[in-house]
Image (cartoon, rainbow, N blue to C red):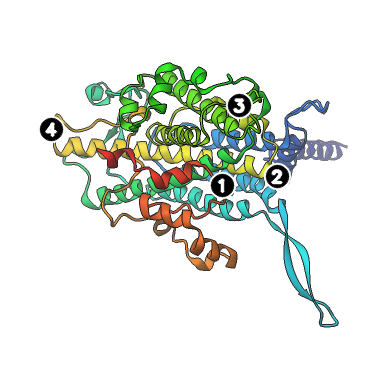
Amino acid sequence: MILETNNNSMAGCKSRLANDSTVTSPRSDMELMKEKFSKLLLGEDMSGGGKGVSSALALSNAITNLAASVFGERKRLEPMPAERKAKWRKEIGWLLSVTDHIVEFVPCRQVSKTGTNMEVMVTKQRSDLQMNIPALRKLDAMLIDCLDGLNDQSEFSYVSKDDESQEETNSRKDDKWWIPTPKVPPNGLSDPMRKWLQFQKDSVIQVHKASMAINAQVLSEMEIPESYIESLPKNGRASLGDSIYKSITDEYFDPDYFFTTMDMSSEHKILDLKDRIEASVVIWKRKMNAKDGKSSWGSTISFEKREMFEERAEVILLILKQRFPGIPQSKLDISKIQYNKDVGQAILESYSRIIESRAFTIMSRIEDVLQADAIAQNPSNGEVKRPLSDKEEVGKLNSAENGTSLTLLDFIGWTPDQEDNNTKKYLKEDPTYKDINAKIKCNPSSIVTNKRFSYLENLGMCRSPTARH
């Protein structure tokens, strides 16, 4: 009897342990995937009442939230933890898998059993996704590899905020006081480490330029919501104000002089200027497309002048994007993302945006270490530049000023064998691709667009801010 009771007790313990292990064991990939895609199908409305957001916005939010949970704000230049890296690669793969099923019809020749040649329509992944998704995946992998290269480094560390002996060293002179200060050996970094960091910085700058170009292109192709258009005034002068309007419409226009007359002392003022100029571009485009002068969007100014004003405004927007890559999204961008219904564009925009943001952060952290190294080598040099803040990142998007600068394709090792015949033909024949490659030493070869006026076309017409001085 006693033995039987003990056996029953042991069986009960085993049963409870089995149940506990089931509760505490990590969820399988299948369960995580089911939960993630269920939320996407519900449009983030867990009540099931059909009040959720569109599929495009749900996917955009999912990619943005995943990046925020995995990367957060990188305060140090250090490798990613293995579990976070595995989570990112797994879950971003799930979300990007949606693009495999976004297709378009293309003509294809087939031979029937009787030997007759006929042309039929077959499905193929949409061209913009076929070109841009592999490129963005490569850029994403480059950023992870850059951080992985720091696994065995022991030449620099970071000063603890609690270390009183390093209080003077730890006090940053810029507006990023919460970022830890890197600490290097008394004589600075070794030559191999310094060269490696510089190479990684150049590589990350190329990633930043390419992702920024793709993001700007996708946003420019998104449809402008009617709610945004209805909120605009009926003329560009009312949107810009008299002083800005006069500067842009003057007979002689100099972008450098324009920025010297603007108040760029705060992020809010920079964003306000961008909002005003983007609104004026939309107004001028609608006026140029007005069918008759009786329309509320009609204009008494000639088509040629209106087109010139629009081009000048887009040049200003391009320079703002280059000089201040860390500013928040404008009202137009937010409105486009919120009301966009194209799932493919939503994925491209959000994926390129988070890569752009990560690249800029890593570039800033590398700059901090190189700055500490420069001070260690020459501490008496009072002209050594401090680490740049977001608002002072002027001209840093060009990796070198000489003609031997490496291009993005050199960094990522992209070869024609990795593309299909359509891609090879596109790379050879597209004049925009050749023009950009020659002028800014960056090959956003994966950008597909049918839009006439865009940021990328202005890249070929406008030198970088650094090159003008």
Q: Nearer the viewer, mark 3 or mark 4?
A: 3
Q: Amino acid at mark 4?
A: Asn
Q: Residue at x 48, y 34 (%)?
A: 310
Q: Earlier in the sequence, mark 3 or mark 4?
A: 3
Which of the pair 259/112 is nearer the observer?
A: 259
Task: Say whether residue 93 is left or right of residue 13.
Answer: left
Q: Earlier in the sequence, mark 2 or mark 3?
A: 2
- State the separation of the CA atoms marked 2 and 3: 60 Å
Return the x and y of residue 70 as percentages of the image width and height: 54, 37
As drawn, the residue found furthest toward the right would be 1
Which of the pair 303/51 is nearer the observer?
A: 303
- State the separation of the CA atoms marked 2 and 4: 57 Å
Which residue is under mark 3? 298
Q: Earlier in the sequence, mark 3 or mark 1?
A: 1
Q: Amino acid at mark 3?
A: Gly
Q: Secondary structure at mark 4?
A: loop
Which residue is under mark 4? 381
- State the separation of the CA atoms marked 3 and 1: 55 Å
Return the x and y of residue 451 as percentages of the image width and height: 57, 45
Which residue is under mark 1? 86
Q: Nearer the viewer, mark 1 or mark 2?
A: 1
257 vs 135: above or below: above
> Are circles 2 and 3 on residues that touch, CB within 8 Å?
no
Q: Secondary structure at mark 3?
A: loop
